[in-house]
Image (cartoon, rainbow, N blue to C red):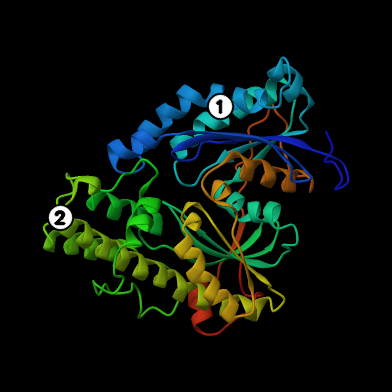
C-alpha cells in the first residue's frame, strides 16, 4: 500500500497502552476526532499511590478488546470490527519508553487487527505523540518549535526541527515532575483517584506558597536538565516536621492540619514549577540561536493539564515573544487521539510497516554532541550542528 497524499483522507485507529490508562481513538486526517475511549486505572493509582507497572499491564489485558471495540461502536458502524477496520487506511500503535510491559498489550492488539484486515501498522513513539498532538489542536503550528513534555515518567525539553527530527535540550536526571506531584499527594493524604497532580493543585489554592522555603533544584547547573528527587525529600521532611498523618484523609483533617497541608502543597508547587520556568527559559534561548524562526512553545503531557503550570510558563513565553500551545487536558493525559494523529503524520510521509512483519520500533531522531551530552556543548555557547551525530 502506498502512502496517501496530503489531500487524500485517512481514517486511523490509535491504540494507547503505555502507562495507567487504556485508550483508543479514531481520527481523520483532517483532524476530526471520530471517537475517543479511555479506561482509567484510578483504583490502582489509589491502591499503590502511583503507577504499578505489573498491575497496569494486567489491567490493560482485561479491557483492551472492550476499549477498541467501544471506540469503533461509537462510530455507529454495524459489524464494526470487520467493516470499519477493513476501511481504515492505517493503524497506529504505541511503543512506550515509560512502561515496556504495559505497551505489549496494545502492540499485540494492533498487530492482530492489522494482520487480520491487511492494514499497514505505524510505529509511534509515546513522547513524540505528546508533542505532535499540539499540531492537531493548533493547525498553524509549524516546525521548528520547542516542546516541554512533562508527565509522571518524563521531563523532556526538545527542539522539534521536523517530523521525526528532534534535538534533546534537556531531560530529568532522576525523577519527573509528575512523580513528585504523586508522592506529595500521597504523603499529604490526598485523594489519588484523579492522580496526584490535580489533587495537589486543588489544595495548593488554599495555601501560602511562601510558607515553606523549599530550595529550587539544580540552581547551580547551567543546563536544561531537571531533578525532582531532592525536592521530594524536602517535601517529605516538611510533612514529617508538621506531624501530618497521611492515613487521615484530607477531608477528615482538622482546619489547622488542613491549612498546614495546603501551605506545603502550595510551597511545593511553586518551586516545582519555578524549576520548569528556569529550564524552559534557558532552552528557549538555546533553541532560538539554532532556529531563530521559532514561534511556539508546546507544553504537553499529563502535568500540562495543570493550570498553574500553564499560567507560569505563559509568562516566560510572552517574555520571549512566543506563543504557548497546550492541548486541552483530555489530550494532555495519555490518549488514543495523539497516537492516531502522529500515525497520520508519519503515514502521509510514507512511513509505515506491512501488517504481518515485525513492527519497526521507530524512535524519534535525537541529536547529541559527540560525548552524548547536548547540554555540554551548549554550555560553551556552541550552536553548530556539523560536529553532532545522530
Residue 166 lies left or right of residue 254; in this view the side is right
Upstream in sequence: badge 2 or badge 1: 1
Can residue 4 be seen in the rendering of this structure?
yes
Neighbor class of circle 1 (other Cα within 10 Å; few <14, some 14-19, many 20+) is many
| Residue 273 at x, y percent in the picture | 41, 68
Q: Residue at x 60, y 42 (%)?
A: 361
* Residue lying farthest to the top in this orientation: 79
Quarter of the figure with residue 324: bottom right
* Residue lying farthest to the bottom in this orientation: 381
280 in relation to 199, above or below: below
Q: Residue at x 72, y 64 (%)?
A: 143
Q: Quadrant of the image for the C terminus?
A: bottom right
Looking at the image, is mark 2 or mark 1 nearer the viewer? 2
Q: Which residue is mark 2?
A: 244
Quarter of the figure with residue 368: bottom right
| Residue 257 at x, y percent in the picture | 17, 57
Question: Mark 2 falls on what kind of element?
Answer: loop
Q: Residue at x 61, y 49 (%)?
A: 129
Neighbor class of circle 2 (other Cα within 10 Å; few <14, some 14-19, many 20+) is some
- From mark 2 to mark 1, how far is it between C-alphas? 40 Å
Task: Compare residues 203 and 151 and report the one nearer the observer.
Answer: 203
Residue 58 lies left or right of residue 369; in this view the side is left
89 in relation to 174, above or below: above
Q: Quadrant of the image for the N terminus?
A: top right
Q: Which residue is mark 1?
A: 67
Task: Compare residues 213 and 353 and report the one nearer the observer.
Answer: 213
241 in relation to 278, above or below: above
Can residue 371 be seen in the rendering of this structure?
no
Amino acid at each position: 500500500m502506498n502512502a496517501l497524499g496530503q489531500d487524500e483522507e485517512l481514517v486511523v485507529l490509535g491504540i494507547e497502552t503505555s502507562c495507567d490508562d487504556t485508550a483508543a481513538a479514531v481520527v481523520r486526517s483532517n483532524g476530526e476526532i471520530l471517537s475517543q475511549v479511555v479506561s482509567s486505572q484510578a483504583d490502582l493509582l489509589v491502591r499503590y499511590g502511583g503507577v504499578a507497572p505489573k498491575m497496569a499491564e494486567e489491567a490493560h489485558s482485561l479491557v483492551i478488546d472492550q476499549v477498541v471495540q467501544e471506540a469503533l461502536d461509537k462510530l455507529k458502524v454495524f459489524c464494526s470490527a470487520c467493516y470499519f477496520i477493513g476501511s481504515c487506511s492505517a493503524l497506529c500503535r504505541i511503543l512506550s519508553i515509560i512502561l515496556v510491559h504495559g505497551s505489549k498489550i496494545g502492540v499485540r492488539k494492533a498487530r492482530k487487527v492489522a494482520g487480520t484486515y491487511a492494514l499497514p501498522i505505524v510505529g509511534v513513539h509515546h513522547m513524540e505523540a505528546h508533542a505532535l498532538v499540539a499540531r492537531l489542536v493548533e493547525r498553524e503550528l509549524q516546525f521548528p518549535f520547542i516542546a516541554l513534555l512533562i508527565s509522571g515518567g518524563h521531563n523532556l525539553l526538545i527542539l522539534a526541527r521536523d517530523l521525526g527530527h528532534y534535538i534533546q535540550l534537556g531531560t530529568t536526571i532522576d525523577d519527573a515532575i509528575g512523580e513528585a506531584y504523586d508522592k506529595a499527594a500521597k504523603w499529604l493524604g490526598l485523594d489519588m483517584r484523579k492522580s496526584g497532580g490535580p489533587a495537589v493543585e486543588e489544595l495548593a489554592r488554599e495555601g501560602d506558597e511562601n510558607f515553606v522555603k523549599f530550595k529550587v533544584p539544580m540552581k547551580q547547573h547551567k543546563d536544561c536538565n531537571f531533578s525532582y528527587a531532592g525536592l521530594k525529600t524536602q517535601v517529605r521532611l516538611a510533612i514529617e516536621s508538621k506531624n501530618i498523618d497521611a492515613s487521615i484523609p484530607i477531608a477528615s483533617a482538622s482546619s489547622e492540619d488542613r491549612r498546614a497541608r495546603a501551605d506545603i502543597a502550595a510551597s511545593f508547587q511553586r518551586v516545582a514549577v519555578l524549576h520548569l520556568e528556569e529550564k524552559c527559559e534557558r532552552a528557549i534561548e538555546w533553541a532560538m540561536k539554532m532556529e531563530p524562526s521559532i514561534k511556539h512553545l508546546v507544553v504537553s503531557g499529563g502535568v500540562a493539564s495543570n493550570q498553574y503550570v500553564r499560567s507560569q510558563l505563559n509568562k516566560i513565553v510572552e517574555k520571549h515573544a512566543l506563543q504557548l500551545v497546550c492541548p486541552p487536558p483530555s489530550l494532555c493525559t495519555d490518549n488514543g487521539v495523539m497516537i492516531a494523529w502522529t500515525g497520520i503524520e508519519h503515514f502521509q510521509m510514507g512511513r509505515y510497516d506491512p501488517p504481518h512483519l515485525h513492527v519497526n520500533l521507530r524512535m524519534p531522531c535525537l541529536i547529541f554532541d559527540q560525548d552524548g551530552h547536548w547540554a555540554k556543548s551548549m554550555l560553551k555557547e556552541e550552536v553548530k550542528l556539523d560536529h553532532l551525530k545522530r
